[in-house]
Image (spheres, grey):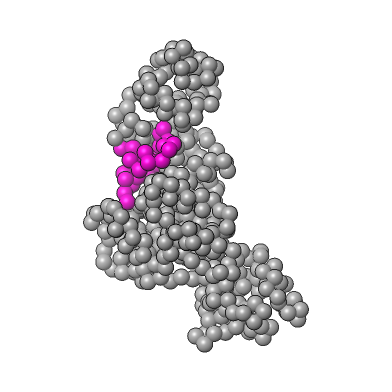
């Protein structure tokens, strides 16, 4: 997107987003009143002062400071790299969906395929401290939708976000692929352990940021990131969320800009189900399988074209994984397993058992919904004999119960979860 832009134009856009104190609203006001960034920078301080505080107007009318010039140089260096692009408000390629929010970004830095910003997409968001079952669901829904040609958008965060990107990547290059919207510059991958995931997303999708390079991903920028996640998508799926959650903010932002909102239900006893249940009470659509989302979005607007389709066998595999609704458990974080067990009224005779770290791992893997031994082995990483032995002890202490189908479920004061 920078190929047809002169050096002067590029520097002007970069300065507009690098100048300290010049926010999105002021920059858009200048663009509307004066014209392109190079016209703004050619204006006198007196002209600019009609739209800006006096000191900011004078700074903008003067040559850039050393700090700002360093930011411009960093932006030019970044955009000179292969597959790096700058999309501005003046570009025809700017996503039309972003004009539907009150404060669209002035520019977008993109690493990867910028055409994906126009693909019909679904945002998948949820808790950072997600359960294994929640992450399984996010991957399965993302893969199913991506295999049907939908783009998958998320925020590269831990937990549900990462699982959503992973599921979309599993659909392969012929699927809808995935977009990661970042809360800092493209050169500041956050969290650090997702560097490898970010490389995969850039290679098979796109990394997107409204911030110039060198901008750190700090908490106050996460809501800005979330508004773009919601606005770029046709619908927002919340997989797991606590009662107070940034994912609920993303869903609310989606509602405000007319997006469909979906939520996966869970156990009434699971803390990470409460946000989803609150959304459902407020009108979000309860979904149990990827097909539910696709059918709803098909009724409300354009759908992915046939060029995004994948071989029939791959779509069938995706349907088996998510379309038929494998809804797994909602496991609490491992470090809370003992406290949850105690709060559930575990008999005193079971105190020793509950203090065992292995027990905590198994209860964490089980969550609050029924699970079989194979699934518990997979989630906990423990061998079958060890899991079976602990389950036997838990059953003898009335902490879990074995169901008729062979699965195990947690108990509380004689009440069976699930």
Q: How many marks?
A: 0
Q: Which of 161/274 is in front?
A: 274
Looking at the image, can residue 324 be seen?
yes
Picture layout, residue 53 above or below residue 282: above
Residue at the far front in the pictured view: 282
Q: Residue at x 37, y 71 (%)?
A: 324
Q: Residue at x 59, y 79 (%)?
A: 416
Q: Residue at x 71, y 77 (%)?
A: 346
Image quarter where the C terminus lies is bottom right
Measured as percent of width and height from the top left, residue 410 is found at: 60, 77
- The segment highlighted magenta reads 93-120
Residue at the far bottom in the pictured view: 404
Q: Which of 376/279 is in front?
A: 279
Measured as percent of width and height from the top left, residue 265 is found at: 48, 66
Question: Residue 41 vs residue 346: left or right?
Answer: left
Q: Which of 151/232 is in front?
A: 232
Image quarter where the N terminus lies is top left
In magenta segment, residue 242: no
Measured as percent of width and height from the top left, residue 363 is found at: 62, 73
């Amino acid at each position: 997107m920078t190929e047809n832009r002169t050096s002067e134009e590029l520097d002007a856009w970069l300065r507009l987003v690098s100048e300290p104190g010049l926010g999105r609203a002021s920059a858009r006001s200048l663009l509307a009143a004066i014209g392109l960034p190079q016209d703004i920078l050619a204006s006198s301080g007196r002209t600019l002062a009609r739209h800006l505080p006096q000191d900011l107007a004078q700074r903008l009318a003067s040559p850039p400071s050393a700090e700002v010039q360093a930011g411009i140089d960093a932006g030019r260096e970044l955009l000179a790299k292969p597959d790096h692009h700058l999309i501005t408000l003046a570009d025809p390629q700017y996503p039309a969906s972003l004009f539907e929010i009150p404060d669209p970004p002035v520019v977008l830095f993109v690493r990867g395929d910028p055409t994906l910003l126009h693909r019909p997409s679904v945002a998948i968001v949820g808790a950072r401290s997600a359960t294994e079952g929640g992450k399984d669901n996010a991957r399965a829904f993302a893969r199913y939708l991506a295999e049907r040609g939908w783009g998958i958008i998320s925020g590269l965060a831990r937990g549900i976000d990462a699982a959503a990107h992973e599921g979309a990547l599993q659909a392969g290059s012929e699927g809808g692929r995935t977009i990661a919207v970042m809360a800092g510059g493209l050169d500041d991958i956050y969290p650090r352990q997702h560097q490898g995931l970010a490389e995969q997303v850039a290679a098979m999708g796109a990394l997107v940021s409204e911030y110039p390079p060198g901008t750190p991903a700090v908490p106050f920028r996460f809501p800005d990131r979330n508004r773009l996640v919601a606005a770029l998508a046709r619908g927002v799926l919340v997989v797991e969320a606590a009662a107070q959650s940034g994912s609920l903010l993303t869903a609310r932002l989606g509602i405000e800009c007319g997006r469909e909102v979906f939520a996966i239900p869970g156990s009434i006893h699971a803390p990470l189900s409460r946000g989803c249940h609150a959304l459902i009470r407020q009108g979000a659509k309860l979904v149990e399988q990827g097909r539910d989302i696709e059918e709803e979005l098909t009724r409300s607007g354009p759908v992915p074209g046939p060029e995004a389709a994948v071989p029939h066998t791959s779509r069938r595999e995706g349907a088996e994984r998510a379309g038929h609704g494998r809804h797994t458990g909602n496991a609490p974080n491992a470090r809370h397993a003992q406290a949850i067990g105690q709060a559930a009224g575990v008999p005193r005779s079971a105190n020793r058992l509950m203090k065992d770290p292995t027990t905590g791992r198994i209860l964490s893997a089980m969550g609050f919904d029924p699970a079989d031994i194979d699934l518990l082995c997979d989630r906990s990483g423990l061998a079958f004999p060890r899991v079976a032995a602990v389950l036997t002890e838990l059953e003898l202490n009335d902490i879990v119960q074995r169901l008729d189908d062979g699965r195990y479920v947690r108990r509380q004061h004689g009440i069976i979860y699930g």
